[in-house]
Image: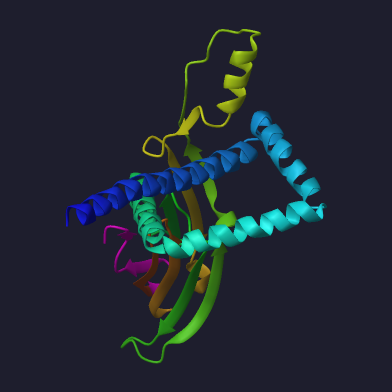
Amino acid sequence: MRRKNINRADESYSSLFKFSSLYAGISMIVTLLFLLTVGLIFQNRFVIVITCLVVVPFVIALLFKKFRKELRKGIVKLRKYVMKNWKVMGAWIFTAYIMLNILIIAMSNLQKPSFIINFVNDKTVPIKFHFENKIPEKVNLSFYSTDDKGNNAVLTQEVEVNKLDFKRSFIEVTEKQISEKASSSMANFLNKEMNKGLNEAYLPDRSHYDYKYEINSFDFLKSGKNFVIIQFEIDSLSNNRVYKVVNEIDVKDRETFIINTEEFSSGN
C-alpha cells in the first residue's frame, strides 16, 4: 500500500513538471508568433533578419531527404503528444480564448460608437448625420409619400450614402516611451530595433473620430404625409447592431413642413 502511494506521488510530481513544460511551450509559441507579427507589420529589421535566418535554412534543409525523414518523425511524435494531452491543451486554449474575448470587449467599450440624426425644419429640409468613432459602410434612405390618412404608400426616392461620402475629422492620441540618449553601442541599437513598433501605445479612450454628412430632402418630399426610413449597420469588436429610423414629415405647402421628430440618437 505504501509502495502504491509512493508511485502515485511520483506520477503526480512528474505530471506537474510535464504540464508545466507544456504550458511554457505553448506560451512561448504564442509570444513568438505575436512578436513576429508585430515586427513584420512595423518593419522591424531585427525581427525580419532573425526570421530570415530561421526560415531560409529550414527551406534549404527541406531539400535533403534525411531532414524530411526526421521531420516526419518529429511530426508523428508531436501528434501523439497532442492526442495524449488534448484535454489539458484544450483547456489552456479555451482559457486563452476567453481572456482574449474579454480584452476585445474591454477595448471596444473604451471607444463606443454613437450617432445623431437631425431633421432640420428649413426650406431645403436637410437631414444631418453625425457619427462618432465608428461609421457604417453605407446608409440607406427611403422616402415614401402617402395620402392624408397614411394609406397607399408610394416610394418616392431611394438614396444610398457610402462611407466615403462622409466628411471626417479626428483627434488621435498615442503615447511613446521616453527616448534614450543617442548612443552608438550595439546594445542600444538592438534594444531600439527590438522595441520598434512596441514602444508606441494607441490610447483609444483619448482618441475621437467624427463623421458628418448632410442631404437635402426637399426634392424627395410630396404634398401630404411623407415617411423617411433610414437604415444602417454599425460594426464593432463585440457585436453588430442594425438601426432603422422612421420619421414622418408633413408637407402643407412648399414652405411649410411639420417634422414629427427632429433628432434621433443612439440613446433613443
Visible residue check, residue 111? no
Place of residue 136 in the rendered image (x, y in percent of width and height, measured from the top left): 48, 60
Place of residue 227 in the rendered image (x, y in percent of width and height, measured from the top left): 39, 76
Direction from residue 216 to residue 236 in the image, left or right? left
What's the image's color scheme? rainbow
Could you say which is closer to the camera, residue 12 or residue 208? 12
Residue occupying the far left of the picture? 1
Place of residue 50 in the rendered image (x, y in percent of width and height, measured from the top left): 68, 34
Which residue is at 22% across, 53% downward? 3
Above-or-below relation of 78 to 243: above
Picture quadrant where residue 153 is located: bottom left
Which residue is at 36% across, 68% downward? 257
Picture quadrant where residue 76 is located: bottom right
Place of residue 84 in the rendered image (x, y in percent of width and height, measured from the top left): 44, 63
Which residue is at 80% across, 46% downward? 60
Q: Quadrant of the C terminus?
A: bottom left
Could you say which is closer to the camera, residue 248 or residue 39? 39
Which residue is at 44% across, 66% downward? 233
Could you say which is closer to the camera, residue 235 or residue 190? 190
Above-or-below relation of 43 to 265: above
Q: Quadrant of the N terminus?
A: bottom left
User: How many labels sit on residues?
Assistant: 0
Above-or-below relation of 45 to 52: above
Visible residue check, residue 97? yes
Could you say which is closer to the camera, residue 51 or residue 230? 51
Magenta-span inclusion, residue 76: no
* Magenta segment: 252-268
Direction from residue 80 to residue 265 in the image, left or right? left
Direction from residue 131 to residue 77 in the image, left or right? right
